[in-house]
Image (cartoon, rainbow, N blue to C red):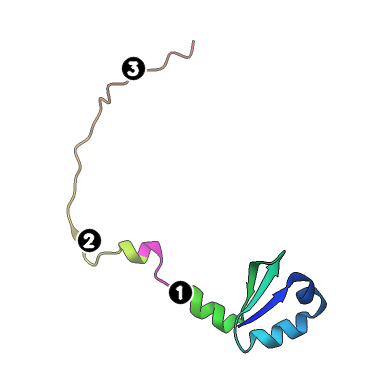
Amino acid sequence: MTVMTSREFNQDSSGAKKAAAKGPVFITDRGKPSHVLLTIEEYTKLAGKGPSIAELFYSPGADEIEFEPPRIDDFGLKPVDFS
């Protein structure tokens, strides 16, 4: 793990990229970690490609289930008078 100040990062971005090849580079701003530099390979591992929301809700055979919900015509609301 490498730690660089934002000033060091600005002055030596190529050094930061070389260090990121060995592991994450933590960049500090006013002494506090503010950013992390990773290789794209490491980022892809962390971010991962999980299933989409559609894939999570997919249920094989669900399209064959007969479902006819009852119609609700009266919600108890009065029509709006726009006059």
Amino acid at pointer 3? Lys
Instruction: Compare marks 1 and 2 and give the one earlier in the sequence.
Output: 1
Real-space Cα separation, disc 3 to disc 1, in angstroms: 48 Å
Q: Residue at x 79, y 71 (%)?
A: 7
Q: Which mark is residue 49?
A: 1
**Which residue corresponds to mark 2?**
62
Extreme-front residue of the structure: 31
Provide residue 19's location: percent of width, then percent of height: 68, 86
The magenta segment: 49-54
**Which residue corresponds to mark 3?**
78
Amino acid at pointer 1? Lys
Q: Considering the whole magenta stretch, tell me its main secondary structure.
A: loop
Q: Which mark is residue 21?
A: none
Query: Is 44 on the left-hand or right-hand side of 19?
Result: left
| Residue 22 sits above or below residue 37 on the image | below
Instruction: Please name which of the two marks, 3 or 1, marks the residue nearer to the observer.
Output: 1
